[in-house]
Image (cartoon, helix red, strand yellow):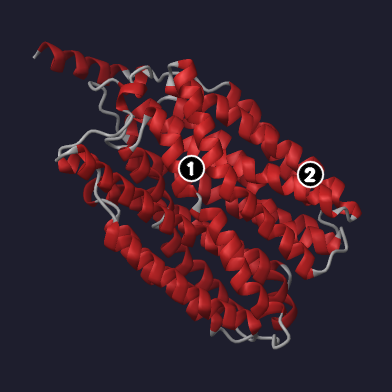
């Protein structure tokens, strides 16, 4: 295959990942806006919608683990197809749940949407990582990850008039969910249609490989598996750094609109506009931070070192963003805007940066299963805990304690990231097997 055709396959992989990320984060961005309307129109307890969201993220984490095995063997197409079915059902069936049956909401939104979204994260991150490494990964993942802020902007703009327009009624959130069901189904079916397998399935090598050779763990003779990888510190350090950041991140994403409406006394329309601004900022910070991380790879001559530096920087920005968010509680729209920009910078780095660091350590052959297991741990705890803690701490009538809780998560993540090593020691038995293979 000539280079032009090979690159075309890589670009289609990025495009499919963009669509998957768009739908995955569409669930998150739409929830923050739908949440207040659902509470007021259904008469449900304030913690119930957040509980459904927490269940969704827990099921998402479990499904993500199994999706990693699917990706390593069959590519991303089956994952995107299943995601299309379950994501659409999650939105549509939730819209039909009667006010008198909150348990059906937990099942429809928590279970179905959890399975659907669980097919999207590992597939999108790992597929891009398998095609682009070294000085190329950050840039192309930044482009794929632009789907997240685009979802926050476009879907919020679609949902907002349905919820706040002159014709909005008490069941407007149901109409919004039906619209979202159609959007995610079409987008993910398109992603499945254009998705490609790993480059080795076509006899190709990932782009940017030469720049990645400075990372010692990328040695070809090391055939990492989830079992051997999870006997080493780098993956556990990544899990803890990612987990603590996720606790803070998901608390912010799911409760920030409530913070602005309750503590800053903003109306829902203004708070929604600020929330949308995070997405608008992300459209620019995603590719920009990807370029910055790739520039560090070239500067350091070691991809692992560059990815580690970005994982220290990202949660540190999250700390500053939380402090400014607290300052915006006085009702300052401008301070809120600056906080949104900083959250967008953090957001552009942390999720993909963790996958990039792990990929630089353990290579791409079994990265789907390794990152799938890491995602199971991180997403099985972080989003659910962050969402529930934010809702519970805000039950007293103020969401200020929730923001401080999120800030604490970013602090721990920053500290842990600073201790991440630049290589992983091959377990003793595997070293022996490698030596025997070399001798043979």
x and y, in percent, of residue 34 in the image: 65, 71
Q: Locate residue 250 relative to residue 426 in the image: left or right.
A: right
As drawn, the residue found furthest toward the front would be 4
**Disc number for residue 261:** none
x and y, in percent, of residue 292 in the image: 54, 30
Q: Earlier in the sequence, mark 1 or mark 2?
A: 1
SS at mark 1 in the image = helix
Q: Residue at x 47, y 29 (%)?
A: 294
For the question of whether residue 391 can be seen, the reply is no
Nearest the viewer among 254 and 328 is 328
Q: Is residue 87 above or below residue 275?
A: below
> Quarter holding the N terminus?
top left
> Quarter holding the C terminus?
top left
Q: Locate residue 214 relative to residue 149 in the image: left or right.
A: left
For the question of whether residue 325 can be seen, the reply is yes
Q: Residue at x 72, y 63 (%)?
A: 273
Q: Locate residue 379 relative to residue 11 in the image: left or right.
A: right
Q: Residue at x 35, y 21 (%)?
A: 217
Q: Residue at x 16, y 39 (%)?
A: 2
Identify residue for label 2.
Answer: 404
SS at mark 2 in the image = helix
Q: How many marks?
A: 2
x and y, in percent, of residue 59 in the image: 47, 59
Identify residue for label 1.
Answer: 142
């Amino acid at each position: 295959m000539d280079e032009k055709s090979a690159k075309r396959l890589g670009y289609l992989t990025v495009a499919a990942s963009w669509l998957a990320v768009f739908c995955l984060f569409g669930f998150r961005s739409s929830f923050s806006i739908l949440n207040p309307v659902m509470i007021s129109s259904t008469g449900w307890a304030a913690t119930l919608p957040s509980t459904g969201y927490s269940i969704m993220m827990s099921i998402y984490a479990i499904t993500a683990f199994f999706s990693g095995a699917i990706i390593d063997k069959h590519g991303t197409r089956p994952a995107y197809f299943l995601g299309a079915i379950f994501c659409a059902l999650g939105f549509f069936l939730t819209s039909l749940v009667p006010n008198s049956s909150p348990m059906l909401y937990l099942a429809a939104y928590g279970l179905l949407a959890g399975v659907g979204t669980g097919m999207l994260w590992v597939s999108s991150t790992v597929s891009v990582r398998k095609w682009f490494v070294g000085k190329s990964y950050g840039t192309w993942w930044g482009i794929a990850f632009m789907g997240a802020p685009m979802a926050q902007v476009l879907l919020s703009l679609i949902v907002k008039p349905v919820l706040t327009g002159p014709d909005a009624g008490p069941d407007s959130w149901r109409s919004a969910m039906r619209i979202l069901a159609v959007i995610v189904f079409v987008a993910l079916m398109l992603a499945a249609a254009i998705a490609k397998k790993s480059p080795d399935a076509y006899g190709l090598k990932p782009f940017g490989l030469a720049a990645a050779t400075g990372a010692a763990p990328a040695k070809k003779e090391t055939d990492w598996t989830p079992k051997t990888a999870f006997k080493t510190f780098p993956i556990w350090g990544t899990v803890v750094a990612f987990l603590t950041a996720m606790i803070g991140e998901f608390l912010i994403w799911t409760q920030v609109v409530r913070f602005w409406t309750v503590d800053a006394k903003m109306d829902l329309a203004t708070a929604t506009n600020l929330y949308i601004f995070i997405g608008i900022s992300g459209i620019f910070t995603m590719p920009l931070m990807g370029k910055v991380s790739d520039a560090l790879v070239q500067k350091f001559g070691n991809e692992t070192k560059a990815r580690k530096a970005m994982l220290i920087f990202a949660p540190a920005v999250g700390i500053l963003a939380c402090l400014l968010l607290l300052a915006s509680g006085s009702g300052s729209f401008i301070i809120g805007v600056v906080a949104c920009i900083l959250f967008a910078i953090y957001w552009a780095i942390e999720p993909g940066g963790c996958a990039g660091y792990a990929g630089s350590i353990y290579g791409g052959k079994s990265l789907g299963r390794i990152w799938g297991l890491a995602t199971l741990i991180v997403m099985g705890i972080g989003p659910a805990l962050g969402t529930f803690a934010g809702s519970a701490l805000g039950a007293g009538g103020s969401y200020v304690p929730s923001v401080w809780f999120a800030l604490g998560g970013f602090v721990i993540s920053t500290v842990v990231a600073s201790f991440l090593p630049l290589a992983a020691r091959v377990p003793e038995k595997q070293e022996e097997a490698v030596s025997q293979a070399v001798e043979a």
